[in-house]
Image: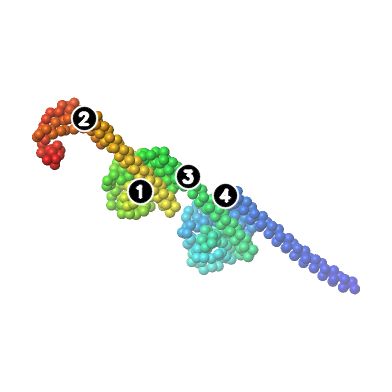
Amino acid sequence: MTEILDDEAADLRRANAELQRRLDECCAERDAATAREAALAEVLDVINRSPGDPGPVFDAILEKATRFCEAVHGQLATYDGEFFRFVAVHGDASFVEEQRAKGLLPPSHGVTWPLIVSGEHFVHMADVRDTELYRSHEGARRFVDVGGGRSLLTVALRRDQTLLGALTIYRQEVRPFSDKQIALLESFAAQAVIAMENARLITETREALERQTATAEVLGVINSSPGELTPVFDAILEKAHSLCGAAYGSLHVADGEAFRTVSVRGMPQAFADFLRRPFQPGPNHPVRKMIEGAPFAVVINSTEFDDPIIQSALKLGGMRTGLFVPLRKDDMLLGYIVASRPEVRPFADKQIALLQNFAAQAVIAMENARLLTETREALEQQTATAEVLQVINSSPGDLAPVFDAMLEKGVRLCEASFGALFVRDGELYYGAATRNLPPELERFVHEPFRPSPNGSNGRAAAKRS
Protein backbone atom coordinates (compact mmCIF):
# COMPACT_ATOMS: atom_id res chain seq x y z
CA MET A 1 0.00 0.00 0.00
CA THR A 2 2.81 2.37 0.91
CA GLU A 3 4.55 1.66 -2.38
CA ILE A 4 1.37 2.46 -4.29
CA LEU A 5 1.00 5.75 -2.49
CA ASP A 6 4.64 6.56 -3.14
CA ASP A 7 4.19 5.87 -6.87
CA GLU A 8 1.08 8.01 -7.03
CA ALA A 9 2.88 10.81 -5.21
CA ALA A 10 5.78 10.56 -7.65
CA ASP A 11 3.39 10.67 -10.60
CA LEU A 12 1.68 13.68 -9.07
CA ARG A 13 5.01 15.45 -8.61
CA ARG A 14 5.97 14.73 -12.22
CA ALA A 15 2.59 15.99 -13.40
CA ASN A 16 2.94 19.11 -11.31
CA ALA A 17 6.45 19.64 -12.64
CA GLU A 18 5.19 19.28 -16.21
CA LEU A 19 2.35 21.68 -15.52
CA GLN A 20 4.80 24.12 -13.98
CA ARG A 21 7.08 23.79 -17.00
CA ARG A 22 4.21 24.45 -19.37
CA LEU A 23 3.07 27.35 -17.21
CA ASP A 24 6.59 28.79 -17.25
CA GLU A 25 6.70 28.40 -21.04
CA CYS A 26 3.33 30.10 -21.38
CA CYS A 27 4.43 32.90 -19.08
CA ALA A 28 7.67 33.26 -21.00
CA GLU A 29 5.79 33.36 -24.31
CA ARG A 30 3.35 35.85 -22.83
CA ASP A 31 6.17 38.03 -21.54
CA ALA A 32 7.99 37.78 -24.87
CA ALA A 33 4.81 38.65 -26.79
CA THR A 34 4.15 41.55 -24.43
CA ALA A 35 7.73 42.76 -24.90
CA ARG A 36 7.40 42.44 -28.69
CA GLU A 37 4.13 44.35 -28.67
CA ALA A 38 5.72 47.00 -26.47
CA ALA A 39 8.67 47.23 -28.86
CA LEU A 40 6.36 47.62 -31.86
CA ALA A 41 4.38 50.25 -29.96
CA GLU A 42 7.59 52.11 -29.15
CA VAL A 43 8.53 52.15 -32.82
CA LEU A 44 5.10 53.53 -33.71
CA ASP A 45 5.61 56.22 -31.08
CA VAL A 46 8.96 57.14 -32.69
CA ILE A 47 7.17 57.34 -36.06
CA ASN A 48 4.60 59.71 -34.57
CA ARG A 49 7.31 61.84 -32.95
CA SER A 50 9.46 62.01 -36.09
CA PRO A 51 7.12 62.97 -38.95
CA GLY A 52 9.04 63.30 -42.18
CA ASP A 53 12.31 62.09 -40.61
CA PRO A 54 12.66 58.29 -40.89
CA GLY A 55 16.23 58.26 -39.52
CA PRO A 56 15.30 57.86 -35.81
CA VAL A 57 12.66 55.30 -36.79
CA PHE A 58 15.18 53.19 -38.70
CA ASP A 59 17.58 53.27 -35.75
CA ALA A 60 14.83 52.24 -33.32
CA ILE A 61 13.60 49.45 -35.60
CA LEU A 62 17.06 48.01 -36.08
CA GLU A 63 17.94 48.15 -32.39
CA LYS A 64 14.76 46.34 -31.38
CA ALA A 65 14.88 43.88 -34.28
CA THR A 66 18.38 42.70 -33.43
CA ARG A 67 17.58 42.52 -29.71
CA PHE A 68 14.30 40.61 -29.92
CA CYS A 69 15.53 38.32 -32.70
CA GLU A 70 18.71 37.59 -30.71
CA ALA A 71 21.01 38.84 -33.47
CA VAL A 72 24.39 40.53 -33.06
CA HIS A 73 24.46 42.77 -36.11
CA GLY A 74 21.92 44.33 -38.40
CA GLN A 75 21.50 46.87 -41.14
CA LEU A 76 18.66 48.61 -42.91
CA ALA A 77 19.18 49.75 -46.49
CA THR A 78 16.91 51.74 -48.79
CA TYR A 79 16.64 50.98 -52.52
CA ASP A 80 16.01 53.54 -55.28
CA GLY A 81 15.43 51.06 -58.08
CA GLU A 82 19.12 50.89 -58.94
CA PHE A 83 21.23 51.14 -55.79
CA PHE A 84 21.02 50.26 -52.10
CA ARG A 85 22.19 52.66 -49.40
CA PHE A 86 22.64 51.92 -45.69
CA VAL A 87 20.49 54.23 -43.54
CA ALA A 88 20.83 52.40 -40.21
CA VAL A 89 23.48 49.99 -38.88
CA HIS A 90 23.60 48.13 -35.55
CA GLY A 91 26.54 46.22 -34.08
CA ASP A 92 30.03 46.84 -32.82
CA ALA A 93 31.63 50.20 -33.52
CA SER A 94 33.98 49.04 -36.27
CA PHE A 95 31.14 47.31 -38.14
CA VAL A 96 28.89 50.36 -37.89
CA GLU A 97 31.64 52.71 -39.06
CA GLU A 98 32.55 50.49 -42.02
CA GLN A 99 28.99 50.11 -43.24
CA ARG A 100 28.04 53.77 -42.84
CA ALA A 101 31.11 54.80 -44.87
CA LYS A 102 29.76 52.95 -47.91
CA GLY A 103 27.81 54.97 -50.43
CA LEU A 104 25.49 53.70 -53.14
CA LEU A 105 25.79 49.96 -53.64
CA PRO A 106 24.48 47.77 -56.48
CA PRO A 107 22.34 44.75 -55.54
CA SER A 108 25.22 42.45 -56.49
CA HIS A 109 27.18 43.83 -53.54
CA GLY A 110 24.88 42.21 -50.98
CA VAL A 111 24.62 38.55 -50.05
CA THR A 112 20.82 38.43 -50.12
CA TRP A 113 19.98 41.59 -52.07
CA PRO A 114 19.94 39.93 -55.53
CA LEU A 115 17.27 37.47 -54.30
CA ILE A 116 15.24 40.27 -52.72
CA VAL A 117 15.42 42.32 -55.93
CA SER A 118 14.30 39.27 -57.94
CA GLY A 119 11.10 39.10 -55.88
CA GLU A 120 11.76 37.08 -52.72
CA HIS A 121 9.83 38.30 -49.67
CA PHE A 122 12.54 37.13 -47.29
CA VAL A 123 15.80 35.16 -47.47
CA HIS A 124 16.88 32.93 -44.59
CA MET A 125 20.30 31.24 -44.66
CA ALA A 126 20.85 28.89 -41.73
CA ASP A 127 24.60 28.89 -42.46
CA VAL A 128 25.96 31.10 -45.22
CA ARG A 129 29.17 29.09 -45.22
CA ASP A 130 27.25 25.98 -46.20
CA THR A 131 25.85 27.46 -49.43
CA GLU A 132 26.89 27.58 -53.07
CA LEU A 133 26.72 31.36 -52.74
CA TYR A 134 29.65 31.29 -50.30
CA ARG A 135 31.76 29.45 -52.85
CA SER A 136 30.83 31.72 -55.78
CA HIS A 137 30.10 35.17 -54.34
CA GLU A 138 32.91 37.39 -53.09
CA GLY A 139 30.53 39.35 -50.88
CA ALA A 140 29.32 36.17 -49.19
CA ARG A 141 32.88 35.03 -48.52
CA ARG A 142 33.74 38.43 -47.08
CA PHE A 143 30.58 38.32 -44.98
CA VAL A 144 31.70 35.02 -43.41
CA ASP A 145 35.49 35.23 -43.43
CA VAL A 146 35.86 38.91 -42.50
CA GLY A 147 32.57 39.78 -40.82
CA GLY A 148 32.15 36.47 -39.03
CA GLY A 149 28.56 36.08 -40.20
CA ARG A 150 26.93 32.66 -40.27
CA SER A 151 23.11 32.65 -39.84
CA LEU A 152 21.51 35.38 -41.95
CA LEU A 153 17.97 36.73 -42.37
CA THR A 154 16.83 39.47 -44.75
CA VAL A 155 13.28 40.77 -45.16
CA ALA A 156 12.23 42.98 -48.06
CA LEU A 157 10.70 46.42 -47.50
CA ARG A 158 7.93 46.68 -50.09
CA ARG A 159 5.03 49.01 -50.78
CA ASP A 160 2.64 47.10 -53.01
CA GLN A 161 5.04 45.64 -55.59
CA THR A 162 7.71 48.32 -55.27
CA LEU A 163 10.92 47.38 -53.47
CA LEU A 164 11.92 50.17 -51.08
CA GLY A 165 14.77 48.47 -49.25
CA ALA A 166 15.86 45.53 -47.11
CA LEU A 167 16.17 44.79 -43.38
CA THR A 168 18.96 42.34 -42.52
CA ILE A 169 20.11 40.74 -39.25
CA TYR A 170 22.67 37.99 -38.66
CA ARG A 171 24.40 35.90 -36.05
CA GLN A 172 28.04 34.99 -35.76
CA GLU A 173 27.20 31.42 -34.85
CA VAL A 174 25.17 28.81 -36.70
CA ARG A 175 21.74 29.22 -35.10
CA PRO A 176 18.86 29.54 -37.57
CA PHE A 177 16.14 32.07 -36.85
CA SER A 178 12.79 30.69 -35.72
CA ASP A 179 9.47 31.19 -37.52
CA LYS A 180 8.42 33.60 -34.77
CA GLN A 181 11.59 35.64 -35.24
CA ILE A 182 11.06 35.75 -39.01
CA ALA A 183 7.47 36.94 -38.44
CA LEU A 184 8.71 39.54 -35.96
CA LEU A 185 11.29 40.87 -38.41
CA GLU A 186 8.52 41.11 -41.02
CA SER A 187 6.53 43.24 -38.56
CA PHE A 188 9.50 45.55 -38.07
CA ALA A 189 9.96 45.73 -41.85
CA ALA A 190 6.30 46.73 -42.22
CA GLN A 191 6.87 49.54 -39.70
CA ALA A 192 9.91 50.71 -41.67
CA VAL A 193 7.72 50.91 -44.78
CA ILE A 194 5.14 52.96 -42.83
CA ALA A 195 7.89 55.37 -41.75
CA MET A 196 9.18 55.66 -45.31
CA GLU A 197 5.70 56.24 -46.70
CA ASN A 198 4.94 58.87 -44.06
CA ALA A 199 8.21 60.64 -44.83
CA ARG A 200 7.49 60.48 -48.57
CA LEU A 201 4.00 61.94 -48.20
CA ILE A 202 5.16 64.67 -45.83
CA THR A 203 8.10 65.52 -48.11
CA GLU A 204 5.87 65.64 -51.20
CA THR A 205 3.35 67.83 -49.38
CA ARG A 206 6.08 70.17 -48.16
CA GLU A 207 7.69 70.33 -51.61
CA ALA A 208 4.32 71.03 -53.25
CA LEU A 209 3.68 73.84 -50.77
CA GLU A 210 7.16 75.25 -51.36
CA ARG A 211 6.59 75.13 -55.13
CA GLN A 212 3.21 76.83 -54.84
CA THR A 213 4.64 79.49 -52.52
CA ALA A 214 7.61 80.12 -54.83
CA THR A 215 5.33 80.32 -57.88
CA ALA A 216 3.04 82.77 -56.09
CA GLU A 217 6.00 84.90 -55.03
CA VAL A 218 7.36 85.06 -58.58
CA LEU A 219 3.90 86.00 -59.90
CA GLY A 220 3.81 88.68 -57.21
CA VAL A 221 7.11 90.08 -58.51
CA ILE A 222 5.73 90.02 -62.07
CA ASN A 223 2.63 91.92 -60.96
CA SER A 224 4.60 94.44 -58.92
CA SER A 225 7.16 95.05 -61.70
CA PRO A 226 5.14 95.50 -64.90
CA GLY A 227 7.54 95.73 -67.81
CA GLU A 228 10.58 95.31 -65.53
CA LEU A 229 12.27 91.96 -66.22
CA THR A 230 15.41 92.17 -64.06
CA PRO A 231 13.66 91.68 -60.66
CA VAL A 232 11.55 88.90 -62.17
CA PHE A 233 14.57 87.04 -63.55
CA ASP A 234 16.44 87.43 -60.25
CA ALA A 235 13.44 86.07 -58.30
CA ILE A 236 13.03 83.14 -60.70
CA LEU A 237 16.68 82.14 -60.36
CA GLU A 238 16.62 82.40 -56.58
CA LYS A 239 13.47 80.27 -56.22
CA ALA A 240 14.36 77.75 -58.92
CA HIS A 241 17.87 77.11 -57.66
CA SER A 242 16.73 76.80 -54.06
CA LEU A 243 14.01 74.24 -54.84
CA CYS A 244 16.07 72.31 -57.40
CA GLY A 245 19.12 71.97 -55.17
CA ALA A 246 21.34 74.02 -57.51
CA ALA A 247 24.35 75.90 -56.20
CA TYR A 248 24.34 78.61 -58.85
CA GLY A 249 23.24 79.41 -62.38
CA SER A 250 22.11 82.04 -64.84
CA LEU A 251 19.37 83.21 -67.16
CA HIS A 252 20.06 84.14 -70.77
CA VAL A 253 17.95 85.76 -73.49
CA ALA A 254 18.29 85.50 -77.26
CA ASP A 255 19.79 88.49 -79.05
CA GLY A 256 19.64 87.66 -82.75
CA GLU A 257 21.76 84.56 -83.26
CA ALA A 258 23.64 85.20 -80.02
CA PHE A 259 22.66 85.04 -76.36
CA ARG A 260 23.34 87.46 -73.54
CA THR A 261 23.20 86.90 -69.80
CA VAL A 262 20.62 89.00 -67.95
CA SER A 263 20.75 87.43 -64.48
CA VAL A 264 23.26 85.34 -62.50
CA ARG A 265 23.10 83.81 -59.04
CA GLY A 266 25.72 82.36 -56.74
CA MET A 267 28.51 82.01 -59.29
CA PRO A 268 32.09 83.31 -58.98
CA GLN A 269 32.51 86.87 -60.26
CA ALA A 270 35.07 85.84 -62.90
CA PHE A 271 32.60 83.49 -64.55
CA ALA A 272 29.72 85.98 -64.18
CA ASP A 273 31.81 88.61 -66.02
CA PHE A 274 32.64 86.05 -68.71
CA LEU A 275 28.96 85.23 -69.25
CA ARG A 276 27.83 88.84 -69.56
CA ARG A 277 29.52 89.11 -72.96
CA PRO A 278 27.15 88.10 -75.80
CA PHE A 279 28.12 84.74 -77.27
CA GLN A 280 27.05 82.25 -79.90
CA PRO A 281 26.85 78.62 -78.74
CA GLY A 282 29.18 76.24 -80.52
CA PRO A 283 28.06 73.01 -82.24
CA ASN A 284 28.46 70.94 -79.05
CA HIS A 285 26.92 73.45 -76.64
CA PRO A 286 23.75 72.12 -74.89
CA VAL A 287 21.74 75.07 -76.24
CA ARG A 288 22.10 73.62 -79.74
CA LYS A 289 19.80 70.76 -78.74
CA MET A 290 17.20 73.26 -77.52
CA ILE A 291 17.50 75.27 -80.73
CA GLU A 292 16.58 72.03 -82.50
CA GLY A 293 13.54 71.64 -80.24
CA ALA A 294 14.69 69.60 -77.23
CA PRO A 295 12.64 70.26 -74.03
CA PHE A 296 15.87 70.50 -72.00
CA ALA A 297 19.57 69.63 -72.13
CA VAL A 298 21.97 68.32 -69.51
CA VAL A 299 25.69 68.20 -68.83
CA ILE A 300 26.25 65.26 -66.50
CA ASN A 301 29.99 65.78 -66.13
CA SER A 302 31.55 68.90 -67.65
CA THR A 303 35.03 67.34 -67.62
CA GLU A 304 33.82 65.04 -70.41
CA PHE A 305 32.07 67.77 -72.44
CA ASP A 306 33.75 69.16 -75.57
CA ASP A 307 32.67 72.81 -75.66
CA PRO A 308 34.76 75.92 -74.84
CA ILE A 309 31.97 77.65 -72.89
CA ILE A 310 31.29 74.54 -70.81
CA GLN A 311 35.01 74.21 -70.14
CA SER A 312 35.06 77.86 -69.04
CA ALA A 313 32.13 77.05 -66.73
CA LEU A 314 34.26 74.29 -65.22
CA LYS A 315 37.44 76.37 -64.97
CA LEU A 316 35.98 79.69 -63.83
CA GLY A 317 32.77 78.57 -62.15
CA GLY A 318 33.48 75.04 -60.95
CA MET A 319 30.43 73.61 -62.73
CA ARG A 320 30.35 69.83 -62.99
CA THR A 321 26.66 69.10 -63.61
CA GLY A 322 24.39 71.53 -65.44
CA LEU A 323 20.72 71.60 -66.43
CA PHE A 324 19.60 73.82 -69.33
CA VAL A 325 15.89 74.59 -69.81
CA PRO A 326 14.60 76.71 -72.71
CA LEU A 327 12.44 79.82 -72.53
CA ARG A 328 10.15 79.13 -75.45
CA LYS A 329 7.06 80.83 -76.85
CA ASP A 330 5.40 78.60 -79.44
CA ASP A 331 8.39 77.51 -81.58
CA MET A 332 10.54 80.56 -80.82
CA LEU A 333 13.49 80.17 -78.44
CA LEU A 334 13.58 83.33 -76.31
CA GLY A 335 16.39 82.22 -74.02
CA TYR A 336 17.20 79.61 -71.40
CA ILE A 337 17.81 79.01 -67.67
CA VAL A 338 20.85 77.17 -66.29
CA ALA A 339 21.02 75.39 -62.93
CA SER A 340 24.46 74.09 -61.95
CA ARG A 341 26.13 71.95 -59.30
CA PRO A 342 29.82 71.81 -58.36
CA GLU A 343 29.64 68.01 -58.05
CA VAL A 344 28.56 65.29 -60.49
CA ARG A 345 24.95 64.80 -59.40
CA PRO A 346 22.24 64.63 -62.07
CA PHE A 347 18.96 66.47 -61.57
CA ALA A 348 15.87 64.40 -60.81
CA ASP A 349 12.82 64.39 -63.08
CA LYS A 350 10.90 66.43 -60.50
CA GLN A 351 13.62 69.06 -60.47
CA ILE A 352 13.67 69.26 -64.27
CA ALA A 353 9.87 69.71 -64.31
CA LEU A 354 10.16 72.38 -61.62
CA LEU A 355 12.76 74.34 -63.59
CA GLN A 356 10.54 74.08 -66.67
CA ASN A 357 7.71 75.61 -64.63
CA PHE A 358 9.90 78.56 -63.66
CA ALA A 359 11.00 78.90 -67.30
CA ALA A 360 7.32 79.22 -68.24
CA GLN A 361 6.98 82.03 -65.70
CA ALA A 362 9.96 83.80 -67.23
CA VAL A 363 8.27 83.59 -70.63
CA ILE A 364 5.08 85.06 -69.13
CA ALA A 365 7.10 87.96 -67.74
CA MET A 366 8.84 88.53 -71.07
CA GLU A 367 5.55 88.44 -72.96
CA ASN A 368 3.95 90.85 -70.46
CA ALA A 369 6.90 93.21 -70.84
CA ARG A 370 6.67 93.02 -74.65
CA LEU A 371 2.94 93.76 -74.67
CA LEU A 372 3.34 96.62 -72.20
CA THR A 373 6.18 98.07 -74.27
CA GLU A 374 4.20 97.80 -77.50
CA THR A 375 1.13 99.35 -75.86
CA ARG A 376 3.18 102.18 -74.38
CA GLU A 377 4.95 102.82 -77.69
CA ALA A 378 1.66 102.83 -79.60
CA LEU A 379 0.19 105.26 -77.09
CA GLU A 380 3.25 107.50 -77.31
CA GLN A 381 3.07 107.47 -81.12
CA GLN A 382 -0.63 108.32 -81.08
CA THR A 383 -0.05 111.09 -78.55
CA ALA A 384 2.84 112.52 -80.59
CA THR A 385 0.75 112.43 -83.77
CA ALA A 386 -2.11 114.20 -82.00
CA GLU A 387 0.25 116.83 -80.62
CA VAL A 388 1.73 117.51 -84.07
CA LEU A 389 -1.77 117.82 -85.51
CA GLN A 390 -2.59 120.34 -82.80
CA VAL A 391 0.49 122.39 -83.79
CA ILE A 392 -0.61 122.24 -87.43
CA ASN A 393 -4.11 123.43 -86.49
CA SER A 394 -2.77 126.18 -84.26
CA SER A 395 -0.21 127.43 -86.80
CA PRO A 396 -1.99 127.73 -90.17
CA GLY A 397 0.47 128.78 -92.82
CA ASP A 398 3.43 128.67 -90.44
CA LEU A 399 5.56 125.57 -90.98
CA ALA A 400 8.42 126.30 -88.56
CA PRO A 401 6.55 125.24 -85.36
CA VAL A 402 5.22 122.17 -87.16
CA PHE A 403 8.71 121.11 -88.28
CA ASP A 404 10.07 121.70 -84.77
CA ALA A 405 7.29 119.61 -83.22
CA MET A 406 7.75 116.80 -85.75
CA LEU A 407 11.49 116.66 -85.19
CA GLU A 408 11.18 116.77 -81.38
CA LYS A 409 8.71 113.87 -81.39
CA GLY A 410 10.74 111.84 -83.89
CA VAL A 411 14.00 112.21 -82.00
CA ARG A 412 12.38 111.31 -78.69
CA LEU A 413 10.34 108.32 -79.91
CA CYS A 414 13.27 106.90 -81.87
CA GLU A 415 15.55 107.35 -78.85
CA ALA A 416 17.99 109.44 -80.94
CA SER A 417 20.49 111.96 -79.55
CA PHE A 418 19.92 114.64 -82.17
CA GLY A 419 18.36 115.19 -85.58
CA ALA A 420 17.57 117.56 -88.42
CA LEU A 421 14.66 118.08 -90.82
CA PHE A 422 15.50 119.12 -94.38
CA VAL A 423 13.20 120.59 -97.04
CA ARG A 424 13.75 120.73 -100.79
CA ASP A 425 13.96 123.97 -102.74
CA GLY A 426 14.42 123.09 -106.40
CA GLU A 427 17.66 121.12 -106.67
CA LEU A 428 18.86 122.23 -103.26
CA TYR A 429 18.09 121.20 -99.67
CA TYR A 430 18.40 123.18 -96.47
CA GLY A 431 17.76 122.49 -92.79
CA ALA A 432 14.33 123.73 -91.69
CA ALA A 433 14.54 122.39 -88.11
CA THR A 434 17.23 120.95 -85.85
CA ARG A 435 17.32 119.19 -82.50
CA ASN A 436 20.36 119.05 -80.17
CA LEU A 437 22.86 119.37 -83.00
CA PRO A 438 26.49 120.18 -82.17
CA PRO A 439 27.29 123.89 -82.99
CA GLU A 440 29.54 123.10 -85.98
CA LEU A 441 26.87 120.84 -87.49
CA GLU A 442 24.13 123.34 -86.67
CA ARG A 443 25.78 125.98 -88.90
CA PHE A 444 26.29 123.52 -91.71
CA VAL A 445 22.72 122.20 -92.09
CA HIS A 446 21.21 125.67 -92.52
CA GLU A 447 23.31 126.29 -95.65
CA PRO A 448 21.58 125.16 -98.88
CA PHE A 449 23.34 122.16 -100.43
CA ARG A 450 23.04 119.76 -103.30
CA PRO A 451 22.93 116.15 -102.00
CA SER A 452 25.56 113.70 -103.19
CA PRO A 453 24.05 110.90 -105.33
CA ASN A 454 25.77 108.32 -103.11
CA GLY A 455 24.80 109.92 -99.80
CA SER A 456 21.71 109.14 -97.74
CA ASN A 457 20.02 112.41 -98.71
CA GLY A 458 20.82 111.83 -102.38
CA ARG A 459 19.40 108.29 -102.32
CA ALA A 460 16.27 109.53 -100.54
CA ALA A 461 15.87 112.33 -103.13
CA ALA A 462 16.30 109.84 -105.97
CA LYS A 463 13.55 107.61 -104.58
CA ARG A 464 11.28 110.65 -104.10
CA SER A 465 11.76 111.83 -107.67
* Real-space Cα separation, disc 2 to disc 3, in angstroms: 62 Å
Label 1 belongs to which residue?
Answer: 327
Distance of label 4 from label 3 (alpha carbons) = 22 Å
Which tag, 1 or 2, sits closer to the chain's start? Answer: 1
Gap in angstroms between the C-alphas marked 1 and 4 = 38 Å
Looking at numbered disc 2 in the image, what kind of residue is underneath it? Pro
Distance, label 1 to label 3, CA atoms, is 21 Å
Residue type, label 1: Leu
Mark 1 residue crowding within 10 angstroms, few (<14) / some (14–19) / many (20+):
many
Q: Quadrant of the C terminus?
A: top left
For residue 299, above or below residue 114: above
Q: In which quarter of the image is the N terminus?
A: bottom right
Q: Residue 308, image x and y in percent? A: 30, 48
Could you tell me if residue 250 is visible in this image? Answer: no
Work out whether mark 1 precedes mark 3 in sequence or the reverse, and give the earlier one.
3
In percent of the image, x 75 and y 65: which residue is there?
Answer: 22
Dots 1 and 4: beta carbons under 8 Å? no
Label annotation for residue 175: none
Which residue was labeled with disc 4? 51
Q: Foreground: 369 or 113?
A: 369
Crowd rating for badge 2 (residues with CA inside 10 Å; few <14, some 14–19, many 20+): few
Q: Nearer the viewer, residue 379 or 269?
A: 379
Q: Which label sits on residue 213? A: 3
